[in-house]
Image (spheres, rainbow, N blue to C red):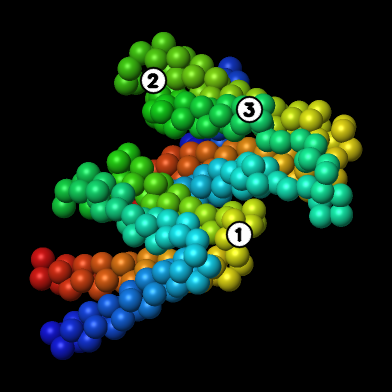
Amino acid sequence: MASAGIKTVILLSFVLAVGFLLVILSCALWANWLPLLVALTFVLAPLPNAVFARCGGDDFSAEYDGSGPVDLGRFITASVVVTGFALPLVLAHSEVITKGACAMSIAGGALVYGTIMAYSQTFKEGDSEFD
Amino acid sequence: MALPRSHYDPRRVCINPFPGISLGKHRRTIGIYLAGGLFALANWTFLDAAVLSAHAHPPYTEPQIPPPVHVTFVDWLPGICSLLGMIVINLIDKDRVQGHEDFGDARAVWRARLFLFIGFALMAGGLAGSVTVLVLKYILHHYTEQYTYYGYANVSQNVALMLSAIVLWISQSVSTEYEYTLSI
């Protein structure tokens, strides 16, 4: 488990680095630093879920996943993720950034977000086994 | 299917027959994520039109003609109406509207239904207003497709906002108590 955890961490950090590389390249190649907002959006995306997750319920109401704050966190998370995909498309549509920068920033942002998701998913599983 | 028939009251104006959607155990979560995504999609559709309008340049063949129309505050109004309606709808306690009059008094149910009506009226007004703006501001002036896109984006923003509110409402009112009564 420990070695697999270390391998997972190394792999995820490489993917994260590639994601940030893509986003920064999409900014630097065209000397237009607006796509950096995409990376910021995707980094902020899991934050509402993390903040509101504790507001859910205790162990006695674990199967009743229906409290307002948790729903609000999920709503905001979904909005922010869609924002991360929509922002470069909107910028590319109005020719503020080029299509290449749009594609690269979307791919990089998705890699960053996927890394964060996979990381939290992997280590949440590991924790809950010992609860 | 969705509601027990005993709760049906023929005096009510707004009957909300919740459809029984079975997406398994995570249907509430999926519905809320879907509603959030639709919400962001709606607003970005309109913001796309607004950004496009702000960066609009004259056609290259005749560079002296400025763009004939821009996105102004009138275009923002239907979206604001829909947004207010969505907030009003989601602030209402769902159990009050369904008319469980055994807790709370009957006046609370009446007031909750009134505010629900106001919320839905705001959303419908936003949708109707967006269609009005599309017809009066863009179609009747015979603009080219580049400019009527602003109006169509406005309409699709309001449609998606309404869909988002509906999905959010349905997914939040599919309660686990219903499963509980079924399983017993």
At x 20% / y 48%, what residue is drawn? A54
Q: What residue would you read off at disc 2?
A: B101
Marks 3 and 1, how far apart at CA: 24 Å
Q: Give the numbered dot on residue A92.
A: 1
Question: In the picture shown, does residue A13 fall above or below A69?
Answer: below
**Badge 3: few (under 14), some or many (20 or more) residues near its Cα, within 10 Å?**
few
Q: Subunit of mark 3?
A: B
Residue at figure coordinates x 63%, y 37% from the top left: B158
| Host chain of mark 1 | A
Q: Is residue B110 left or right of residue A77?
A: right
As helix, strand or loop, the secondary structure at mark 1 comes to helix
Residue B61 visible in the current orientation: yes
Residue B161 falls in which quadrant of the image? top right
Identified at 53% across, 67% down, the residue is: A30
Q: Specify whether A97 is left or right of B30.
A: right
Q: Amino acid at mark 3?
A: Phe
Name the element at disc 2: loop
Outermost residue toward the left in this view? A130
Residue at 78 percent of width and 47 percent of height:
B58
Labels 3 and 1 within one chain: no
In the depicted view, which residue is nearer to us: B92 or A105? A105
**Quarter holding the N terminus of chain B?**
top right
How many residues crowd around disc 1 within 10 Å: few (fewer than 14), some, or many (20 or more)? some
Quarter of the image for residue A3 reads bottom left
Kind of residue sitting beneath label 1: Ala
Q: Which residue matches tag 3?
A: B73
